[in-house]
Image: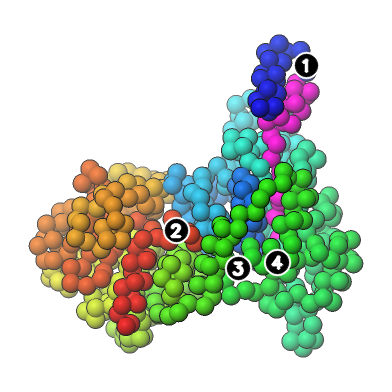
Amino acid sequence: MLRKTLIRFLRNIQKSKEIGKKDFYILHRNIYVQTKFIVILGSVLSGLGKGVVTSSIMKILSFYGYKVLPVKFDGYLNYDCGTMNPYRHGEVFVLDDKSEVDMDFGMYERFLGKNLTGELSITGGKIFSEIIEKERRGDYLGNDVQIIPHLTDLIIEKIEKIAKRYELDVMVIEVGGTVGDIENSYFIEAMRQLALKHKTVFVDLTYIPKLDAVGEQKTKPTQYAFKTIMGSGIMPNYILCRSSEPLSEKARSKIALYTNLDKKRILDDSDLATIYELPIHLLEQGFDKLIIEDLELEKKEFNKQAFEKWKSIVERIKEPSKRVKIAIVGKYVELKDAYISVKEALNHAGAKLDCGVDIKWIESEDLEKGDLSILKDVDGIIVPGGFGKRGIEGKINAIRFARENKIPYLGLCLGMQLMVVEYARNVCGLEGANSTEFNPKTKYNVIDLMPSQKGIKNKGGTMRLGSWKCEIVDKDSIAYRSYKKRFVYERHRHRYEFNNKYRKLLKENGLKISALTPDKRLVEMVEWRSQFGIGTQAHPELKSKAEEPAPLFVSFLDAAISRKK
């Protein structure tokens, strides 16, 4: 009630122009932006798991009922992640609103149980594009445009707008990269300035190595990294210590001494059985009490029921009553992060079915010579998405092996397209059938470029992206038994589609087309009739969450369990 009264008061002042712009801005910020901020930095080296830490902190705050969302900053000059190589950057994660973002957004959604939007992803490319656009428009007439204050002001403005729009209690900001990188230095400076305006807490995620020759955890890299952060004008409130073993009391004491922090603010983030255990691990160290006190948040009741539900999921992942082995036949398997959503979707389904999942990563090129004996001991096969010709024939061989040996199969995007290719070749007799992505001159182009894609020149952001409505047209299908409803929404990321010219022929030869777009123009899902085998043009793994597993993954894993029995 008080806030609404203040807002009305502010609007009246704005209309009357009785105060200057600076004073108006201060009033506006204090009334509209009541959000508190947590900034996650990474030091020593990259790849420590800032996304997991960010997600875990948000999960802890959600147990108390605080309204919380993330913002992720990535310093690269790409506008988004859409044109990045999975070998270098990992999976490209797609949101409902068609945004192609960093894979950490998948982690945020899986922990929070919420679907996020692209505005929460701020890249160097987006920021610099907007600055140049504003300069060309004349917004900075008379000024030489600089990193400080123009770029940093724009970053803070974006953050404040998001906080205001969603009326957040807390925003958790993850700064991509490592402290000391040129790429993220201007964002770190913006975070220093943010702390001058709003209640802000800084968390440094560091690495504590243990050398076998010495036999003890070494803190010197963290001490030097802390000096680097201090040199940026930021004093971390917490240090989270990533390590292979629990943080020793000696290492904790030494870090506390050199950083002027209380020992209770030096937190253990050592390897756990599952990433979903980290919120519990931080709660056990009293992190929740400290962070709520530091942020001066309104005291709220801890939701024990929500916590126990999360804890039971963690326990089922850690100690399942049964196990199955699933093969993931991909072309980027050297970097497991390229398929992180597939891996986590299996974990979510496994938790629901009280089943552990042992993943057998198989490089598809290794299957091109015809020796498929590596697949004989698996209980299910997944062929995930991907681009380019390399390894395609190996994936097709794996799909045929699954079909002929009645091994449960799940095809995702490219895995659905190659399921159609395999069926056209080996069941329908269309020798050499292929996708025009891999063979533009194929006689039987059962997978072809969408007409709307043929005139496109720019690669970024031009695929069929985001959430699309799908109609399950066959109630006697794996799809309907999985979703238990006629209409579903799943996320897409592709250019090529099932060629409708072959729809009738493939159906006559036994391939079930179980789902279409509502206008019936595009095929969304296909199935084998005599066994569990389904391919979907979508990426259901992108919407799977720890507390709400993807239905197709649950059905697939259930079929794998049944086959093993």
Label 2 or label 3, whichever comes before in sequence order? 3
The vertical placement of 203 against 429, above or below, is above
Q: Residues within 10 Å of mark 1 (few under 14, many from 20)?
A: few
Label 2 or label 1, whichever comes before in sequence order? 1
How far is disc 4 from disc 1 in space, using C-alphas? 49 Å
* The quarter of the displayed image where residue 271 is located: bottom right
The vertical placement of 245 against 416, above or below, is below
Please state which of residues 78 and 339 is positioned toward the viewer in this rendering: 339
Q: Residues within 10 Å of mark 3 (few under 14, many from 20)?
A: some
> Residue 20, position in %: x, y?
78, 18
Report which residue position mark 2 lands on.
548
Helix, strand, or loop for circle 2? loop
> Residue 1, position in %: x, y?
66, 27
Magenta segment includes 361:
no
- Residue beneath the point at 33% across and 82% down: 564
Quarter of the figure that contains the C terminus? bottom left
Q: Amino acid at mark 4?
A: Glu
Visible in this render: residue 361? no
Viewed as shown, does residue 367 lie left or right of 230?
left
How far is disc 2 from disc 1 in space, using C-alphas? 51 Å
How far is disc 4 from disc 2 in space, using C-alphas? 25 Å
Report which residue position mark 3 lands on.
277
What label does residue 19 carry, if any? Answer: 1
